[in-house]
Amino acid sequence: MTEALLKVDKLVKHFPITGGVLGRVVDKVHAVDGVSFELAAGQTLGVVGESGCGKSTTGRCILRLIEPTSGEVWFEGKNVTAMGKTELRSMARDMQIIFQDPYASLNPRMTVGAIVGEALIIHKLTKTASEYQDRIVELLETVGLNADQMRRYPHEFSGGQRQRIGIARALAVSPKLVVCDEAVSALDVSIQAQVINLLEDLQAKFNLTYLFIAHDLSVVEHISDQVAVMYLGRIVELASAQGLYTRPTHPYTEALLSAMPVPDPQFKRKRIMLQGDVPSPIKPPPGCHFHTRCPIAQKGLCSTESPPLKKVNEGHWVACHLRA
Ligand SMILES: Nc1ncnc2c1ncn2[C@@H]1O[C@H](COP(=O)(O)OP(=O)(O)O)[C@@H](O)[C@H]1O
Ligand SMILES: [Mg+2]
């Protein structure tokens, strides 16, 4: 087996909540609660789950944009969580992130050329002015934009085009891993498909590895090799995309899949309606986080012990006392 490019081991992130006049820590948000997975070079891991389940926090901890509470992140055999500032800075080039709202992450006062070229200057990746210009043109063309557009400003572009600018900016440093955090979630379905196709082309061309975050299973199905389903800070099921969609095993995955539109109504699944809302991550339920809404939960084990991810099939892991 090849060594994983990225290895996440028991990652935990708790955000402290302060209160009172003294600003003491009164509670904490259990945003990520022991997430582990491995990702091989050139592969895509889709991460899905409802809003607030800890997807973005996981992505940000991997890049050390925020500090994990505990756990480790390994990249190319190096412990990212133990890196000092200098080491981290040189590592930063290898890992890039693309956000959901490209408009918020693109400086409105900078031209597209300057936005895409900024990292070239920071990391001293081009030597002469003409080399710098040429590289920007090359990057814009790589993402399906053209050279003339480099003098324009972000507001002059459509949502899909702005996402392409964000992708060009991420590619400028020739990263190995790209975290796509809801990168297509704000786009119309037809535009979503175009951007996903672009990401797939770029992956093949540059051997990119993606952590592809989305709240919607249908978005990750096409692009992912593996899919991790998260619920309240934990991975409840991790499988190949095919395994997950054909043999969903965790009751939560089943419920998510049952809500997904299918092209052929003959294969329509019976809709499983979950009771109630996602509990607060400030006080997640004891035992299996999902037991309060689980259609098959039983008294005892489910509400007292947290189920570990267990292998149910080759490349298929499930965290459920009753199914694994
Ligand atoms: N900086 C922060 N301070 C406090 N709580 C946060 C912060 N960032 C995220 N959270 C909380 O952590 C949980 C997970 O958030 P997030 O990772 O953004 O979820 P997702 O990306 O899956 O929607 C949520 O309850 C969110 O409110
Ligand atoms: Mg998010």
Image (cartoon, rainbow, N blue to C red):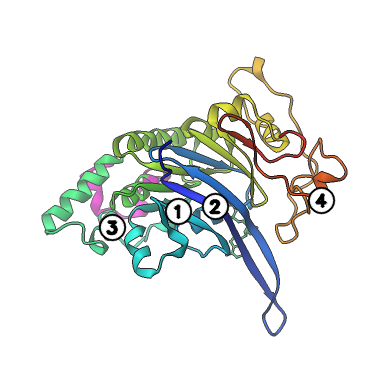
The CA span between labels 3 and 2 is: 40 Å
Q: Is mark 1 within 8 Å of ligand 1?
A: no
The CA span between labels 4 and 2 is: 23 Å
Which amino acid lies under the numbered mark 4 shown in the image of this protein?
Thr
Whether label 1 touches label 2, CB < 8 Å: yes
Q: Which residue is mark 1?
A: 74
* Residue at the spot 49% in from the left edge and 30% down from the top edge: 222
Q: Is residue 114 visible?
A: no
Q: Which picture quadrant has residue 18?
A: bottom right
Q: Give the magenta part as a residue range.
A: 145-163
Name the element at disc 2. strand
Which amino acid lies under the numbered mark 3 shown in the image of this protein?
Thr
Whether label 3 touches label 2, CB < 8 Å: no
User: Which is nearer the eye, 36 or 229?
Assistant: 36
Q: Is residue 286 magenta?
A: no
**Residue 37 place in picture, x, y as percent:** 54, 45
Name the element at disc 3. loop
The CA span between labels 3 and 4 is: 55 Å
Mark 3: few/some/many CA within 10 Å (<14, 14-19, 20+): some
Whether label 4 touches label 1, CB < 8 Å: no
The CA span between labels 3 and 1 is: 36 Å
Which amino acid lies under the numbered mark 2 shown in the image of this protein?
Asp
Whether label 4 touches label 2, CB < 8 Å: no
